[in-house]
């Protein structure tokens, strides 16, 4: 049984998800604590809007990364 290489898209999206869930969420938590930065949002909506930032980073990283070339037919 042959194993295919991990797609670059999967690697990029995984790295973005990791970075978004560690460092970026810490920054977003600090932003959320500063009411001036998210004051224009309704109180119940701001956590959901801030949660979209890591999701958007993951989506963009996966979308922008190139596909890994296939060297043969996988069966």
Image: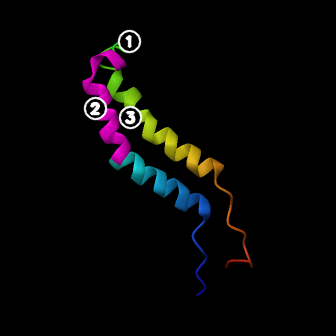
| Residue 71 shown left or right of residue 52 in the figure | right
Q: Earlier in the sequence, mark 1 or mark 3?
A: 1
Q: Earlier in the sequence, mark 3 or mark 2?
A: 2
Name the secondary structure under disc 3.
Answer: helix
Q: In the rendered view of the protein, which quadrant contains the C terminus?
A: bottom right
What is the x, y in percent for residue 43?
29, 16
Residue at left offset 29%, top offset 26%: 32
In the image, residue 35 above or below residue 21: above
- Range of the magenta residues? 23-38
Name the secondary structure under disc 1.
Answer: loop
Q: Earlier in the sequence, mark 1 or mark 2?
A: 2
Q: In the rendered view of the protein, which quadrant contains the N terminus?
A: bottom right
Q: Is residue 37 magenta?
A: yes
- Magenta span main SS: helix
Residue pointed to by mark 1: 40
Instruction: Name the disc covering residue 51, or none.
Output: 3
Residue 45 quadrant: top left
Mark 3 neighbour class, 10 Å CA radius: few under 14, some 14 to 19, many 20 or more:
some
What is the x, y in percent for residue 22?
33, 49
Residue 3 quadrant: bottom right
How far is mark 3 from mark 2, CA to CA? 13 Å
Residue pointed to by mark 2: 30
How far is mark 1 from mark 2, CA to CA? 16 Å
């Amino acid at each position: 049984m042959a194993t295919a290489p991990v797609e670059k898209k999967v690697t990029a999206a995984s790295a973005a998800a990791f970075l978004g869930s560690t460092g970026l969420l810490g920054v977003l938590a600090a932003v959320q604590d500063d009411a001036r930065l998210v004051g224009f949002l309704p109180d119940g909506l701001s956590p959901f809007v801030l949660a979209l930032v890591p999701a958007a980073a993951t989506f963009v990283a996966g979308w922008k990364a190139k596909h890994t070339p296939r060297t043969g037919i996988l069966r």
